[in-house]
Image (tube, grey):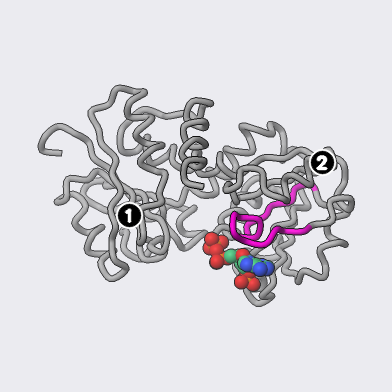
Amino acid sequence: MTDGIRRAAVIGYPIAHSRSPLIHGHWIEQFGITGHYDKIEVHPDDVRSFLMGLAERGLVGCNVTLPHKEAAFQAVQNRDRHAEALEAVNTVWLENGELCGSNTDAFGFLANLDDLAAGWGANGGPAVVLGAGGASRAIIHALIDRDVTPVHVINRTLPRAEALQEFFGSKVRAHGWSELLDLLSTCRILVNTTSLGMEGQPPLEVPMEALPQSALVTDIVYTPLITPLLASAQERGLRIVDGLGMLLHQARPGFEKWFGPAPTVDETLRSLIVKDLESHT
Ligand code: ATR
């Protein structure tokens, strides 16, 4: 920060696709901060040394995206409980010269629902989560935090769902796809964390009529914004929340740590990112 400019960045491999510079750039401008947010491609072999040299590079912190979140978890000296639960770090900052790491994906998921479907978790679970990758783990952690349990995890590769059950304990139950129909009948919130429904991928087919009328359906896929899953839920008259807000809200804690002010997700930011997504499809 020798020139008085606070600098942060997002690291990944590849990194060209990242929307984080647009999000943070919007807030930097909004608050009139003397700051800058870059994207930096870092090879998987170099993640630890990059992070250890953060201050020397003039950075006050960084976001970490795929495939570096686990390496960042290993590299930081201090982790908060969210990082510990996910064994992955997406936000890094410095405190007394030490590297600190958090994972804000669960925060982003919850803040998006709180924003667009207020009161959504008031009656608890059951929740049904489709998929058992890194995103699924963040969402299970989030749902347990809000007592939206039990969380039924359905995955094509059953052992991955079972591993999540083992990690989180009895509030999580692993299932194969053949159990979907039965689980939907009492489901309060259905979350897709698989890549199905993303542009270029096959759609996710779920028998929407099996869900209670009060169920909420949400998807972490945001290209397209309204996935086939969300479209069919909407057609059935169910409440839906798209996945873009999770991306926007997960950026908030990092911005506050690095630059000071607490940013919000407003319509201007949302339409800025929607426009950018549309220009790349
Ligand atoms: P992430 O860490 O981003 O969540 P991931 O680890 O690649 O990504 O997980 C992707 C999820 O989508 C997995 O649950 C995957 O199921 P498997 O564990 O069986 O691979 C799921 N998925 C991807 N393509 C799928 C398909 N065609 N049918 C069913 N599930 C699919």
Q: Is 253 or 212 nearer to us in this picture?
A: 212
> Ligand 1: which quarter?
bottom right
Residue 77 is left or right of residue 189, and the answer is: left
Q: Please determine whether, in this image, residue 196 is positioned above or below residue 253.
A: below
Q: Residues within 10 Å of mark 1 (few under 14, many from 20)?
A: many
Q: Residue under circle 2? A: 235
Q: From the viewer's perspective, tell me whether residue 183 is left or right of residue 139.
A: right
Q: Which residues are the magenta region?
A: 188-205
Does the residue tagged 1 have its C-beta within 8 Å of any atom of ligand 1? no
Three-letter amino acid code at disc 2?
Glu
Looking at the image, which residue sits at the far left?
Answer: 2
Residues 135 and 142: in front is 135
Q: Position of residue 37 (x, y in %)?
A: 29, 40
In terms of image quadrants, where is residue 60?
Answer: top left
Judged from the image, the secondary structure of the residue bearing numbered disc 1 is: strand
What residue did someone put label 1 on? 11
Q: Quadrant of the N terminus?
A: top left
Q: 271 above or below 250?
A: above
- Badge 2 crowding class, 10 Å Cα cut-off, few under 14, some 14 to 19, many 20 or more, is few
SS of the residue at dot 2?
helix
